[in-house]
């Protein structure tokens, strides 16, 4: 029975990811068209303007505070001035498992901070997360979202989901689904 529920859950998440990706792609195109029209009319999209906090590309990423697997308290705002990959994941998620070695390589080879937010409420135990970290040899911070408050704030549907956040705290890219090393580096190089 658990396998059937898990299969239905994964199929539902995949379906939602496809729908969400198609919808956001259409919305992004419309927003870019509107932005181009505004620029043509002499209205600039100056980076000095006050940015809005939100979940869209160009918005300031919403701040949050979580404890790491080792018990340290961190906030997203602690990393202002640095490029960040904010990743939402779980140990039981096959695409999450697939992208972890590439995330570790990315963390070690680039000047990027990775904040890997574990959906702890969906895990069997914190020990499963510790075992996962050891198994994959992960050295970047793992944040424990025990009540899924941050996942809900970021409206996480499929996992993994990653936000690439520039040194000004603005979202520059949103990846729904697993990323490979080349994709990570490409998005990193496109950030300020």
Image (cartoon, rainbow, N blue to C red):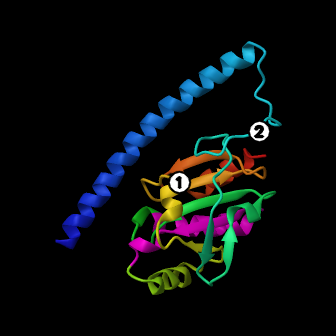
Q: Residue at x 67, y 20 (%)?
A: 36
Eyeballing the image, is 119 above or below 152? below
Q: Dot 1: what SS?
A: loop
- The numbered dot on residue 21 is none
Q: Please say whether residue 107 is one of the residues in the magenta stretch.
A: yes
Look at 60% across and 53% down and name the residue there.
Answer: 163
Residue located 48% across and 52% down the image: 155
* Marks 2 & 1, CB-CB < 8 Å contact: no
In the depicted structure, whether residue 33 falls above or below residue 51? above
Q: Which picture quadrant has residue 103?
A: bottom right
The magenta-colored residue range is 96-123
Mark 2, secondary structure of its residue: loop
Instruction: Name the main secondary structure of what is drawn in magenta.
Output: helix
Q: Position of residue 75 (x, y in %)?
A: 68, 66
- Per the model, the C-alpha gap separating discs 2 and 1 is 21 Å
Residue 39 magenta: no
Percent coordinates x, y for residue 166 in the rendering: 73, 50
- The residue that disc 1 covers is 154
Q: Which residue is label 2 attached to? A: 50
Categorize mark 2 by other alpha carbons within 10 Å: few (<14), some (14-19), many (20+).
few
**Which of disc 1 and disc 2 is earlier in sequence?**
2
Tell me the residue at 70%/47% (across/down).
170
As drawn, is 140 to the left or to the right of 92? right
Label 1 packing within 10 angstroms: few (<14), some (14-19), many (20+): some
Residue 83 appears in which quarter of the rendering? bottom right
Q: Residue furthest left?
A: 1
Residue with the most extreme top position: 41
Q: Nearer the viewer, residue 9 or 43?
A: 43
Residue 110 at least partly seen: no
């Amino acid at each position: 029975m658990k396998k059937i529920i898990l299969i239905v859950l994964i199929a539902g998440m995949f379906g939602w990811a496809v729908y969400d990706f198609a919808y956001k792609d259409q919305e992004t195109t419309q927003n870019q068209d509107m932005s181009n029209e505004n620029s043509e009319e002499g209205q600039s999209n100056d980076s000095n303007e006050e940015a809005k906090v939100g979940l869209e590309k160009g918005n300031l990423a919403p701040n949050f505070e979580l404890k790491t697997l080792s018990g340290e308290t961190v906030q997203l705002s602690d990393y202002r001035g640095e490029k960040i990959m904010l990743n939402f994941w779980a140990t039981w998620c096959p695409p999450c498992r697939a992208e972890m070695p590439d995330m570790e390589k990315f963390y070690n080879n680039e000047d990027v901070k990775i904040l890997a937010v574990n959906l702890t409420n969906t895990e069997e135990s914190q020990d499963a997360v510790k075992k996962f970290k050891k198994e994959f040899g992960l050295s970047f911070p793992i944040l424990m979202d025990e009540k899924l408050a941050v996942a809900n704030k970021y409206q996480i549907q499929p996992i993994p989901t990653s936000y690439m956040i520039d040194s000004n705290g603005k979202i520059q890219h949103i990846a729904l689904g697993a990323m490979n090393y080349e994709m990570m580096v490409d998005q990193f190089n496109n950030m300020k």
